[in-house]
Amino acid sequence: MKRAILAALGLATSLALPAAADDLKVGLLLPFSGVYAALGNDIEAGFTLALDEFGSDTGVTFDVVREDTEVKPPVALGKAKKLILQDKVDVMAGIVSSGVLGAVRDMVHGAGVPLIVANAGNDDATGASCSPFITRMSFSNGQVNRPMGTWMYDQGIRKVFTLAPDYAAGRQMIDGFTQTFTAAGGEVVGQEFTPFQKTQDFGPYLAQAKASGADAVYVFYAGGEAISFVKQYDSFGLKAELPLYGSGFLTSPLYVNAEGPSAEGVITALHYVPTIDNPANAAFVAAFKAKTGRVPSEFAVHGYDAGRALVTAVQTGARDRETLAAALRKVSFDGPRGALSIDPATNNIVQPIYVYETVAGDDGLTQKVLAQLPAEADPVNGCAMPAVSN
Ligand code: PHB
């Protein structure tokens, strides 16, 4: 309750007295406006659900200070500074955009504040720019896309045209897919990166895809851009002649019903869909629905598992920045997505990947799991984990 009140007061919490021994100040850095605002809201809903569900008998009060990144790296850096220097948070969670994660990485690492990444897949953050203070509970861009390269080749697809927004996440997701698809023997016959947050008309890119001689199209789009893309792909008449594949954010349960029948039959892969059949997921889906009235998305589960990771760290007795960072790196549990652990070589999550098709269900569109692919750990990607010096 105290957390909810403090969170609602937002900035006012920065004027609060230093935290008592069993109060933890948590900076929640998410987009609450801009193209990824809905994603930020779902992550927050999952995060607060986990603190309520797992944190209530820890004796620790979680004071959450929320800040809006607006999906703008310079804005997010200013907000991260405020959380770290002014609010003196013990731990931070959140971040949706790979661009924002790249912008705040040095600030977080330099200040020695643990950051639980609850979405942004930026490969560098658990690769060449890895940090003992950054633990990722969501996914890496390569991790969710590499399995699809092999899987699509195994389905008989040989030529693919790729599309994604032109920023770190778009480029890394397409790279991950391309690596395994070409290693299997496939060919990327064309590739375009569309201006991020600025492209409204995908027509010229779809015309290129149509003329490319590809057997299929593979894309990454998320949020508002995913809705526009999937609808335009269908209205352009491409769906029947050129099957659409992608990373699963394209048809996230968070906005797939806004895409409507255009999304039916699209095949994508991701580390979570609400139709995964396991007891932890059944309990999570029921609790999230009871709290929000919505089916949880991958974004909700990132928030939920980030909150659960924080509580798990606290349960080991960790209370300050350094002990929390050390404990977060050792977290593992069976959650809604299956068995999760943190790879100590990179601090990235290790988790299974699910290939799913969007199909019509009783209450709108739903996710039919076609295959569960083995748990994916990232290669170290240049990570030489720095020692904690303070
Ligand atoms: C990212 O920028 O890393 C990102 C954003 C939205 C997604 C997935 C990845 O759905």
Image (cartoon, rainbow, N blue to C red):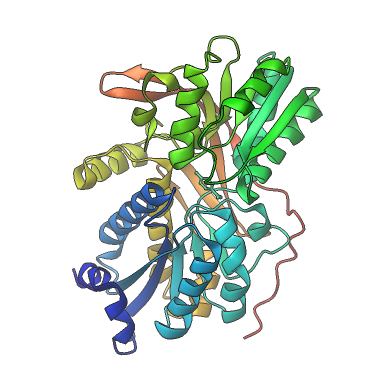
At a point 34% along the width and 52% down the height, the residue shown is: 41
Locate the N terminus by quadrant: bottom left
At a point 38% along the width and 52% down the height, the residue shown is: 43
Q: Position of residue 161 (x, y in %)?
A: 69, 25
Residue most extreme to the top: 241
Residue 354 visible? The answer is: no
- Closer to the camera, 53 or 9? 9
- Closer to the camera, 90 or 43? 43
State how many labels appear. 0
128 relative to 106, above or below: above
- Closer to the camera, 153 or 59? 153
Residue most extreme to the bottom: 17
51 relative to 156, above or below: below
Q: Quadrant of residue 219?
A: top right
Locate the C terminus by quadrant: bottom right
Residue 138 visible? The answer is: yes
Q: Is residue 86 left or right of residue 146?
A: left
Q: Is residue 363 left or right of residue 219?
A: left
Q: Is residue 150 left or right of residue 54?
A: right
Q: Position of residue 162 (x, y in %)?
A: 67, 30
Q: Position of residue 90 (x, y in %)?
A: 43, 78
At a point 38% along the width and 55% down the height, the residue shown is: 33
Q: Is residue 214 left or right of residue 227?
A: right
Q: Position of residue 372 (x, y in %)?
A: 54, 29
